[in-house]
Image (cartoon, rainbow, N blue to C red):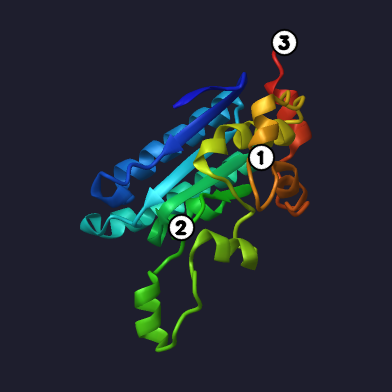
Amino acid sequence: MSGLLYDRPLTAAAFEFNYMGGSMGSVVGERFALAAEYALAERTPFVCFSASGGARMQEGLTSLMQMAKTSAILTRLGDAGLPFISVLTDPTMGGVSASLAMLGDINIAEPGALIGFAGPRVIEQTVREKLPDGFQRSEFLLEKGAIDMIVDRRHMREELATLLGLLMQEPPLPRTAEDEENPPSETATASDAVANIPADASPDTTHSAENTETP
């Protein structure tokens, strides 16, 4: 899907956890790739909202191939200087977390989201050790540096618009009275997240801005 977020163009994809646990099969991988290709063609940022139990076991190796497919198209997006923002909701697990979901230029998680590859019970049974409290929750991952920020869903639109403006070098959004009363994030700001992106990993924002201007 594509559209405007506070007058800022973007292309977005979203998982539906209520359908087969949001698992990623061949059709899911193809649709994700098509959305990313549309973002490339239209020179827009790409945002994905993940909610998945992982690769779709019923499809066998075909589902696992989608991990490489989605990762490859995101590499093309980065090479073109277009930002990819990954929003991880509860849960984001398995092959999805091991591929596209953690490849964002900025990775955002919702509060309390379960994020990881294998679940905590499987890990405990494998290593035969007690895991720390909150293991694989978004707050734990933020503390360890695995994600960039935690944003409540009620403030997601504003934070995404701010991030897109920073990455595409656009003017900031005007502040409203409601913004002052309800700060969007207690853990990190959009500016903090952008500032923490390694220089060699961030998109070429100058190139992006030049190519998204209308004649």
How far is the residue under mark 3 from the one under mark 2? Answer: 39 Å
**Mark 3 sits on what residue?**
215
Q: Which residue of the protein is positioned furthest toward the bottom in this rendering?
A: 128
Helix, strand or loop for disc 3 = loop
Position above or below: 96 against 41: below
Of residues 96 and 110, which is closer to you in this image?
110
Residue 78 placement (x, y as % from top left): 63, 43
Q: Nearer the viewer, mark 3 or mark 1?
A: 1
Q: Is residue 68 left or right of residue 147?
A: left
Residue 183's tag is 1
**Mark 2 sits on what residue?**
97
Give the residue type that dot 1 points to.
Pro
How far is the residue under mark 2 from the one under mark 1? Answer: 28 Å
- Which residue is rendered at x = 31% and y = 54% of the image? 63
Q: Is residue 38 left or right of residue 186?
A: left
Say which quarter of the image contains residue 189: top right
Badge 2 crowding class, 10 Å Cα cut-off, few under 14, some 14 to 19, many 20 or more, is many
Position above or below: 60 against 179: below
Of residues 187 and 195, which is closer to you in this image?
187
Q: Earlier in the sequence, mark 2 or mark 1?
A: 2
How far is the residue under mark 3 from the one under mark 1? Answer: 36 Å
- Which residue is rendered at x = 36% and y = 52% of the image? 52
Helix, strand or loop for disc 1 = loop
Q: Earlier in the sequence, mark 3 or mark 1?
A: 1
Of residues 122 and 41, which is closer to you in this image?
122
Q: Nearer the viewer, mark 2 or mark 1?
A: 1
Give the residue type that dot 3 points to.
Pro
Residue 180 placement (x, y as % from top left): 70, 33
Position above or below: 102 against 169: below
Q: Nearer the viewer, mark 3 or mark 2?
A: 2
Helix, strand or loop for disc 2 = helix
